[in-house]
Each structure stands twice: as structure tokens, then as C-alpha cells.
Amino acid sequence: MTRLERAWYRNAGWLSLLAPLETLYRWGVKRRRAQFESGQRRTWRTPVPVVIVGNLTVGGTGKSPLVARLVRDLSAAGWRPGIVSRGYGGRGARYPLLVTSQTPVAQSGDEPLMLAQQTGVAVAVDPDRPRAAQLLLEQRGCDIVISDDGLQHYALARKLELVVIDGKRGLGNRHCLPRGPLREPVSRLQEVDALIGNGGFEAIDAQDGAGVPRFDMRVVPRQWRHLASGRVLPVSSPPFGEQRVEALAGIGHPQRFFDTLTALGVVHRAHAFSDHHRFVPDDLPVGEATVVMTAKDGVKCQSWADERCWVLDVEAELDDAFDSWWRERVGDGAVP
């Protein structure tokens, strides 16, 4: 976590110096959205339902595990889902880019490649999300599109908006960029279809998004996966026994991964990197100790990982109330 991010969640006094920039940012956000609403900027409405899985804050909140969970549920129900993504951290030769499990991560970005490998469905990357969605419809016959992030990408019309919130960190100091971590004002929560609390809602005020359905989500460990061979082991049978491991995390909130290891009883030394960090072999700690990392980091290391490297795969769990709410909106083949 950078110094600025730490300041956002501690509400450091010096952030008040950024108030003029926040005012300018808020004006820009309001003006841009007004342009889409007035028709000055074009919004494309697909002939199939689009579901946005986004967040209000900068940094990771657990969107990708939820995207994977929704896609698996849709596939099991007979849908042909596809995923669109900005592809942050990747640079394709041209866009839109159809991502497969074998696409070089330098082209796709880490999260799209991870989702392609985890779900097996079509994933399209493009800074222009409508163009990515059009590719899924035309080349893969998708009948529903899930957007990984994109809450603020109004060029793509949507039927449902699900906002994932870090239940422990909340909304920080509740200010917009650069004074705080918010991409849009807190009032935006009143307009979405559901709030998903990753770890509950203990850090969220009751009036935030008042009246909007709230559902708890837990991101739970699923298995240990050997990066070089693909061999998997149950969470209860770690490959390193009780030995200390070296833990790497280059995600939006690395401490969440380290806390998960602690909860599993894994003795580890933590190595935190910035979100979307491009790992190279020299990033691996020296020595013979087992190295464990997130699935998102694993896709960036899989081409050169040595025998020490393992991934802890996780999955999203939601309560029954969410499942009922979700089925009511997509189970009959149409999102209202």
C-alpha cells in the first residue's frame, strides 16, 4: 500500500491540501456522466443483459472472485456468459483481444487471464468495453455479459450494477480522488442494484446506499495449486506442512491474503507488492522455502515458476439470500 493509500484510510490531516483537486475531479465526474445522460456521448445498449461488477473505491475489493462465481452459476443454469475487462496491466497488439488460457499475460493483463483460466468462458479485453462486448456476441454467441469493473464506464449500458465493498476498510475517508479513494461520490451507492460486502459491512454506514439490498460475501480458500505442474491439494493438506513459507501478494490489498494465510495457520513471511506488479524471477525470495501467492499473481509467474511456487486458489461464497435475489433477476432468462 502506498503512502497515499494509507493516508486515505487513516484520514491524514494533510489530505485537506488536496481539496481543490478533489473539487475539480468531482466536477469532471459529474460533467462526464451528464454528457452520457444527455446523449452528447454515445452509450451502447447490447441486445443481451449486461451485469456490472464494480466498486466505488480505487484498489481491490474482491470483484474478480465474485465475477468467477456468477459466471459459473450462469453456465450451470444454461447461459452462455462472457466477461469483458479493461485489461489493466496488459497491452495487446490490437483490440478487442479475445483472451484464452494461453494468452500471454503481458497482452491480456493479470485478471482477465486468471478469469479465463478459472472459468473457461470467453473473456474479451478492450479499453472500449462496448467493443469488447460486441466481440463476445458476434464471435462467441454469448447471451449475457459480465463486466469485471466498469461501474464508471458509462459507454456500456447495463441492466444490473453490483458494487463490491471491502467490509473492513470501507470507503476510507469518504472523499473522492485524489483526496480520498472514491472514484465517485458516496451518493452513487443509492443508484446501484446491490451492495456486496466482502467480509460484511462493519465499516460501512447504515445510510450508505440506504434501501439498496445488501449481501455478505466471503472469499474462502479452495485449494493449493502447484504452479509448474498444476497439481492440486486440499486446503487442509498444505504441501509445506508446518514449515514457514514466503508469501507474495501483488494485489489491491495484500494484507487480505496474508490474513487468510494466518487464519489457515500458515506461518509465513509477507512480501507485499503494488497492485498488478509485474513479477520477474528476481522477485522470488532467495532460499529453498516454499513460495505461496495469489492466483492473480500466479498467472504472471507461471511461465518461469520453479518447483517452490504454489498458488492458494480462492472462491466467493454468498448467502442464500443473494442466490434467491440473483435467480429472480437472471434465472428466467431476462434481467428486468
Image: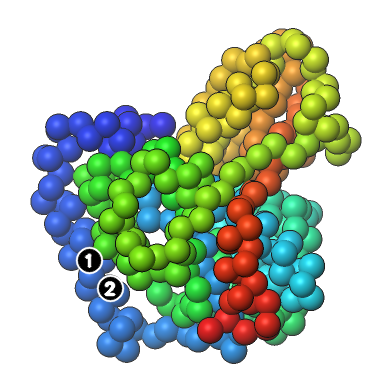
Q: Quadrant of residue 120?
A: bottom right
Query: For the point 36% across and 41% down, which residue is it?
Result: 203
Residue labelled with disc 2: 32
- Viewer-closest of 83 and 100: 83
For numbered disc 2, what is the local secondary structure?
A: helix
Q: Is residue 108 left or right of residue 230?
A: left
State how the image is colored: rainbow
Q: Residues within 10 Å of mark 1 (few under 14, many from 20)?
A: few
Q: Quadrant of residue 74?
A: bottom right
Residue 9 higher or lower than 81, as above or below: above
Q: Residues within 10 Å of mark 2 (few under 14, many from 20)?
A: some
Q: Is residue 61 left or right of residue 319?
A: left
Residue type indicated by callout 2: Arg
- Residue 88 placed where, x, y %? 52, 54
Q: How far is mark 1 from mark 2, CA to CA? A: 6 Å
Query: For the point 57% across and 81% down, which residue is it?
Result: 335
Residue type indicated by callout 1: Gly
For numbered disc 1, what is the local secondary structure?
A: helix
* Image quarter hosting the N terminus: top left
- Whether residue 51 appears in this view of the structure is yes
- Residue 286 placed where, x, y %? 67, 13
Q: Is residue 109 left or right of residue 174?
A: right
- Residue 30 placed where, x, y %? 23, 70
Query: For the point 51% across and 68% down, which residue is it?
Result: 52
- Contact between marks 1 and 2 (CB within 8 A): the answer is yes
Residue labelled with disc 1: 28
- Whether residue 89 appears in this view of the structure is no
- Residue 271 placed where, x, y %? 55, 22
- Viewer-closest of 156 and 283: 156
Query: For the point 64% across and 49% down, which residue is it?
Result: 316
